[in-house]
Image (spheres, rainbow, N blue to C red):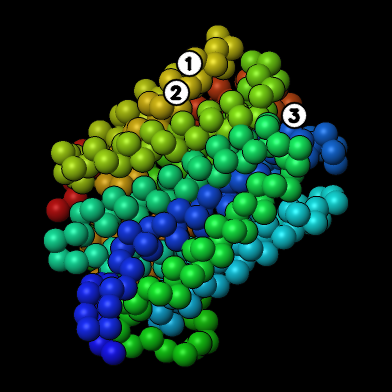
């Protein structure tokens, strides 16, 4: 039986291509944000502060960073499929922790396992989607990879918010549904063709740290700072927006909270699609500018206590984040040599996930001292400065 590369048709039949790999990516990332609208219910059940909510969220991001540093380039050596299957197993184990949850230990364990799954997926799934595309499909595959990442992250809170609001088992049914999706995704992975030419059989881990090839360093600087700023906005919505909606705006409908979080990721996916008309080198500073406008709207919503302004800020900020993120990822992955592409993409995601975790913990700490609104204003001001710096650098030193 003979099967051609990139999942195309042969005498042996048709194998799944980059779109199937993107579905796997989306399912895995959706599991990482499932708990977002449920934190309020966990607070009532277990009893913990807003700072602890952000720490629970940050534990996930720190697990992502750790895996990226330790095994970010592992799929370059062992192959994409084994790493993707391992990520699905970790995602299923995370859902199991939430189903068995009786207190903070299992809550933290579930987030750690979820972070490990996301860490493996970020580099391996992105590379797999791009590599499974045919010669004329690279642009569409690049969009599919980033859209699967952001779309999956957005679908998680939307799904769990709807189920939690309108079912009698708000803390268990979302995770049972996710387990079913993980089973489907695992079956798809089993059918995917391997894109690494000579994979090794479970070699020793060789942690790379944040290793960037010399030819990528120039573009990596502005791209990674822009990603940091954009992911900081995503972290704010994923960790704190439901609490702000409940405490300040008196919005207690979990489906609405999930939809607000979903809106920023939906807008991110839309922003990524705009790179069809804007070159990556111009999309990076443009995205940073739109992100700044979105952050100003978020700050205005905190001052005016307006749900409408918060949603507008999510839509505008998400669009800017998506535009800048896809441009940054396109520039970084395009500049990386094939034998180091997975590791370089993983280094890029290390910076991005630092942005989604560290600033949010700062918001939680400030919230216990100044209050949630004031902490959010300090946060938006700092991220605006970062986005402005990245955009200005990209304008002054555009990538080749």
Position of 140 with respect to 362 (left or right) is left
Tell me which label, 3 or 1, sits earlier in the chain. 1
Residue drawn 23% across and 53% down? 140
Position of 317 with respect to 118 (left or right) is left
Q: Is residue 383 visible?
A: no
The quarter holding residue 188 reads bottom left
The quarter holding residue 324 reads top left
Q: Which residue is mark 1?
A: 309
Q: Which residue is mark 3?
A: 368
Q: Secondary structure at mark 2?
A: helix
Q: Secondary structure at mark 3?
A: helix
Q: Nearer the viewer, mark 2 or mark 3?
A: 2
Q: Which residue is mark 2?
A: 313
Q: Position of residue 247 (x, y in %)?
A: 70, 20
Q: Nearer the viewer, mark 3 or mark 1?
A: 1
Other-residue count near label 2 (Cα within 10 Å), few / some / many at <14 / 14–19 / ≥20: many
Residue drawn 40% across and 74% down? 191
Q: Position of residue 399 (x, y in %)?
A: 19, 50
| Callout 2 touching callout 1 (CB < 8 Å) | yes
Q: Secondary structure at mark 1?
A: helix
**Can you say which quadrant of the picture contains the N terminus?**
bottom left
Other-residue count near label 3 (Cα within 10 Å), few / some / many at <14 / 14–19 / ≥20: few
Query: Disc 2 and disc 3: Cα gap in Å?
Result: 24 Å
């Amino acid at each position: 039986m003979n099967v051609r590369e990139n999942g195309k048709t042969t005498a042996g039949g048709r194998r799944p291509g980059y779109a199937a790999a993107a579905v796997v990516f989306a399912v895995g990332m959706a599991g990482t944000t499932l708990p977002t609208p449920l934190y309020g219910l966990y607070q009532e059940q277990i009893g913990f502060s807003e700072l602890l909510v952000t720490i629970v969220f940050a534990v996930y991001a720190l697990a992502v960073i750790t895996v990226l540093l330790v095994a970010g380039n592992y799929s370059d050596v062992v192959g994409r499929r084994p790493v993707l299957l391992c990520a699905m197993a970790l995602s299923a184990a995370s859902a199991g922790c939430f189903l068995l949850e009786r207190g903070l230990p299992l809550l933290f364990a579930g987030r750690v396992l979820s972070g490990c799954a996301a860490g493996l997926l970020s580099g391996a799934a992105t590379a797999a989607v791009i590599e499974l595309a045919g010669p004329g499909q690279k642009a569409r595959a690049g969009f599919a990879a980033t859209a699967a990442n952001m779309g999956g992250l957005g679908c998680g809170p939307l799904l769990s918010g709807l189920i939690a609001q309108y079912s009698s088992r708000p803390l268990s049914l979302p995770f049972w549904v996710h387990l079913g999706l993980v089973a489907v995704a695992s079956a798809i992975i089993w059918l995917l063709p391997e894109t690494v030419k000579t994979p090794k059989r479970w070699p020793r881990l060789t942690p790379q740290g944040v290793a960037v090839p010399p030819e990528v360093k120039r573009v990596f600087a502005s791209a990674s700072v822009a990603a940091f700023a954009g992911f900081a906005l995503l972290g704010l919505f994923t960790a704190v927006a439901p609490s702000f909606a409940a405490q300040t705006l008196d919005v207690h409908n979990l489906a609405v909270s999930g939809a607000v979080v979903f809106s920023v990721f939906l807008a991110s996916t839309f922003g990524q699609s705009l790179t069809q008309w804007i070159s990556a080198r111009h999309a990076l500073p443009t995205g940073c500018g739109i992100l700044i406008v979105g952050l100003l709207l978020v700050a205005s919503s905190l001052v005016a206590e307006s749900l409408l302004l918060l949603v507008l800020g999510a839509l505008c900020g998400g669009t800017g984040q998506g535009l800048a993120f896809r441009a940054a990822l396109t520039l970084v992955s395009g500049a990386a040599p094939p034998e180091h592409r997975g590791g370089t993409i993983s280094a890029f995601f290390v910076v991005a996930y630092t942005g989604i975790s560290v600033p949010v913990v700062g918001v939680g700490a400030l919230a216990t001292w100044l209050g949630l609104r004031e902490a959010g204003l300090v946060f938006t001001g700092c991220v605006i400065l970062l986005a402005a710096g990245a955009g200005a650098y990209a304008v002054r030193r555009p990538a080749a």
